[in-house]
Image: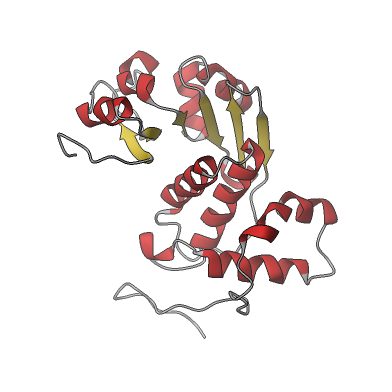
Amino acid sequence: APDCPPPARAAVASLTPGRRAPWIAQAARKGTRIFADVGWDDTGAWDLAGLADLEHCEAFLPNAEEAMRYTGSTCPKAAAHALTEHVPVAVVTLGAEGAYAVDRRTGETAEVPAIAVEALDPTGAGDVFVAGFVTGTLAGWPLADRLALAGLTAALSVQEFGGSLSAPGWSEIGAWWRRVQSLDTQNPAALRRYAFLDPLIPTHLDRPWPLRRAVPTIGFGRNT
């Protein structure tokens, strides 16, 4: 990480137990909003005090197992609430069950189920989830909409091979949204959860679903 991070509206950090990253505090002091995740604690300590940079973060996005171990909770939702004693926004990913989030400042809570898709490659899906949540946050959306976009972008990403190259853009999001609205079998309540997409998708991005991309990684193939 650079010693003097450039100005930015937001940054994503991966916290390391027992170690500070000086750039996080420097960026936060300059007004950058920090969104953090964390890897598995190989030491087995699972001590939130060891995540010293959490004090500079706006949001913390662990998975359910990590959240419960760090808080000593037996329930992911309880863990999310406990984490907001240390960070304003806690987002706990629940795997196939979706995600749950709490915003201490507004009092909002939100739960969004996972979107069922045919997964080809999960590489980078967690990073795409965080990017979707950051996007919604910078746009000033309600917590539930931020969580829904994060889950949707992650779900779309696993349908493509590769890491960052699998991250969907508005073309993919728009094509998916028009497709699911056209299906008679869709649950109306589920569709309403994503109705916030309507004014966001440019009308000129009217492309069919599913979209197909070039395979970005040598050694992968796609059945056609």
Report the residue at 52% width, 66% height from top.
Answer: 159
Where 59 falls versus 70 (above or below)? below
Q: Residue at x 56, y 18 (%)?
A: 73
What quarter of the picture does the N terminus occupy? top left
> In this view of the protein, can residue 47 be seen by the observer?
no
Q: Where is residue 148 drawn, in percent x and y?
A: 63, 47
**Residue 215: percent from the left, percent from the top?**
38, 77
Does residue 143 appear anywhere in the picture?
yes
Residue 220 found in image quarter: bottom left
Q: Nearer the viewer, residue 68 or 131?
A: 131
Residue located farthest toward the left when viewing the structure as drawn: 3
Q: Is residue 17 left or right of residue 214?
A: left
Above or below, 100 against 164 in this view is: above
Please name the residue shown 62% across and 34% down the image.
100
Where is residue 42, by image quadrant?
Answer: top left
The image position of residue 118, as x and y in percent, is 58, 65
Judging depth in this view, the residue of 75 and 132 nearest the camera is 132
